[in-house]
Amino acid sequence: MEQTIPEVIRTVPLQHYVFFAAALFSIGVLGVLTRRNAIIIFMCVELMLNAVNVLLAAFSAYRADPNGQVFVFFIMAVAAAEVAVGLGIIVMIYRNIQNTDVNLLDRLKW
Amino acid sequence: MDAPLAVYTGSPLPYILIPLLPFLGFLINGLLNRRLSGTVAGAISSLAVLGSFLIAVSLFWSFLHPEPQWTIPGTGTHQPYTVHLFDWIRVGSLHIPFSYQIDQLSLIMLLLVTGVGFLIHVYSIGYMHHDENVGKFFSFLNLFVFSMLLLVMGANFLILFIGWEGVGLCSYLLIGFWNKNTSYNNAAKKAFIINRIGDLGFLLGIFLIYQTFDSVEYGSVFQQAAKLPVGAGVVTAITLLLFVGAMGKSAQLPLYTWLPDAMAGPTPVSALIHAATMVTAGIYMVLRSNILFTLSPDTLHVVAWVGALTALFAATIGLAQNDIKKVLAYSTVSQLGYMFLALGVMGYTSSLFHVLTHAFFKALMFLGAGSVIHAMSNEQDMRRMGGLRKALPITFFTFLIGCLAISGIPPFSGFFSKDEILAHAFEHSKPLWAIGMLTAFLTAFYMFRLLFLTFFGEFRGTEEQKHHLHESPASMTMPLVVLAILAAIGGFMNAPLVLGRGYLADFLAPLFAYSRQANPAAFGAELDHATEYMLIAASVLVALGGIVLAYALYVARKARPAEDDAQRGFLENLVYHKYYVDELYNFLFVKPSMFLSRSLHDVVEKRVVDGTVNGLGRGVFGGSERLGRLQTGRVETYLLLMVVGIVVVLALNFMKF
């Protein structure tokens, strides 16, 4: 018998999703805090967003509530827009300073 | 309470125009300051004043020929009336309309201010044509005429006060007209500050009037005052306070020191403001409130003695001055003292009479002095003059008339007015009369000393000045001639035809009706004719004595005043240095207040105020510098702080704070 996607999701216990999302989110935070390359920071931000997405999808399946999945779509749309703008900015920064190290961008400091 | 004075109901236009024309002149010249040439600016202001003069003449004429409904029943004289322009202040019970009072006194003052003012404006066109700021000069002069007209036309003490302050301001502006010279600026400040002292007294007097009579309108105040008994304490207080104001404005002891310094201004200013009009504002004010003064014999006593002592004191200083304008300045102070003496002995008419004649001959002499200074290339020291008679014949001749008039030689104007004052003084108190006679002697002496030193003998200036000597242009000599005619014949307007009362006295009599009714005894009996002849003879002899003495010293013996650094005897030194009054005031008032200001500046300003303000500034600056370090420019720091913040918020949220 064919299984629905929520049923597939429910084959894994909920705690596993929570731990996985927490680990993924922490990796993202650590990456953002420690790395200086703008592109890596950017990827770490995506990591955090996706951790949240995983969690939302899991909770949605377990609670049989489609709202969570709708949120996931919103987040993906926002992330896509963010990628478009953010990468554009990073390209411009690179053209100006031939580097993507965020700590070089401190001209607005007091 | 019905209105004590008739209210004029016709068109107020002429009454508005009288002060408005000079004000327009002020605006035009003030706004187009440098765009008009000097002659045009002078013509505009002169025409403005001439316009006011003509309107004043027509008002005077219709006042002399009243329509039947305006006459006081039983007599042919015109009723005094007020012209209501608009309600100015109306707060609770305080109601002050902006209105003019037209009566004998204000009409005469109007004619004087606009008439003499016009002549002096015309003179200024010639006198000031070298100056670079002619426009500014004429605008100030017009502003002065405007304020002075408000002063004499106002129907309550508040409008009088506006005019009073306005003329004070113009006086300040014009004394310091050549404001690149620090000592001139100091003279202007001195005049302004000393006048403030007097104004304080005047203002307190007005407050007390309002408190007592619940009004500042002349009509209602005087009507109520006339019902008070002679010697009422509150009236004495009011009149003494008003007199303090008059002392400041009219340069009486002890507030006279600003007037001689005021000679720093251009000479037409000295003639108009510091001789003919503004300084007589104090006398106008006393005359206006004559009923109050009549009710207080004590104040009158003070007025008479202050006047007499000022007259004598200033005359003695005038003896030793070498600056031509300073002599005239002290002479003005002395003559103002005469006018107050006349007020103090209740010779109200003779006081106003002397105001008029003095305006003629003193304006004449100041303008003559201006003509001399003009010819001498701004030299004012009489020791450098001499023999100017031939070079400046018109100036000399008109000046001579002025000197004869002020010395009291018949039939020139000063003779009549001074003689009347002395007769009144004689009636009231012999010591006052004696002081008056002594002053008359000194006056004749120092005026002819001035005349002889300036116009007789050898020329003592430099060759260059001698070469430059010239009679002044017609715009300057014409006013001199007109004023000389007035100074010569002006006395006849109140000449006792057969030793009775003159025309002016009859004309002014209604002004003093309340006084006469309140205290008839104080006016004194008429002197008998024999005594009057005696007094006339005595005063003429005394004046002639002064002239002869001056002639003997300065023409026959060719005496010359000593140079500044010459050795002097004790008395001579005292007089030469003006009794050290300036030094005394400097020591008593200026130094202590300077000391106080300095110490307040050093302690309160520097330590307390600056300390607080600067400390606050430094605190904010230091704090912000420390806070600013948070902004490191390192993205990790920001993000770390953000994460820490989020964690803290979440933690607080979970722990249910």
Image: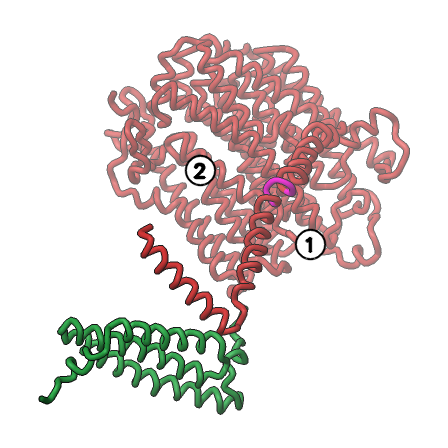
Chain colours: A green, B red
The chain letter under disc 2 is B
Q: Quadrant of residue B90?
A: top left
Please give the name of the residue rendered at 53% of the width and 25% of the height, measured from the top-left corner. B351
| Residue B309 appears left or right of B104 | right
As drawn, the residue found furthest toward the right would be B567
The reply, left or right, for residue A62 in relation to residue B331 is left
User: Which type of secondary structure does the marked residue at label 2 adopt?
Assistant: helix
Magenta stretch bounds: B606-610
Q: Which residue is mark 1?
A: B471
Whether residue B498 appears in this view of the structure is no
Return the x and y of residue B547 as percentages of the image width and height.
Answer: 74, 29
Q: Which residue is mark 2?
A: B162
Q: Chain of mark 1?
A: B
Task: Please tell me whether residue B598 is drawn above or below residue B234 in the rendered image.
Answer: below
Neighbour tally class for label 2: few under 14, some 14-19, many 20 plus, Cα within 10 Å:
some
Q: Left of B333 or right of it: where is B550?
A: right
Q: Which mark is residue B578?
A: none
Q: Is residue B28 above or below residue B94?
A: below
Mainly helix, strand or loop, the magenta region? helix
Closer to the camera in the image, B196 or B369: B196
Earlier along the polypeptide chain: callout 2 or callout 1? 2
Q: Residue at x 60, y 33 (%)?
A: B194
Residue at x 40%, y 59% (from the top left corner):
B648
* Residue B344 visible within the image: yes
Looking at the picture, how far across and down is residue B99, in whole percent? Answer: 33, 36
Q: Amino acid at mark 2?
A: Ile
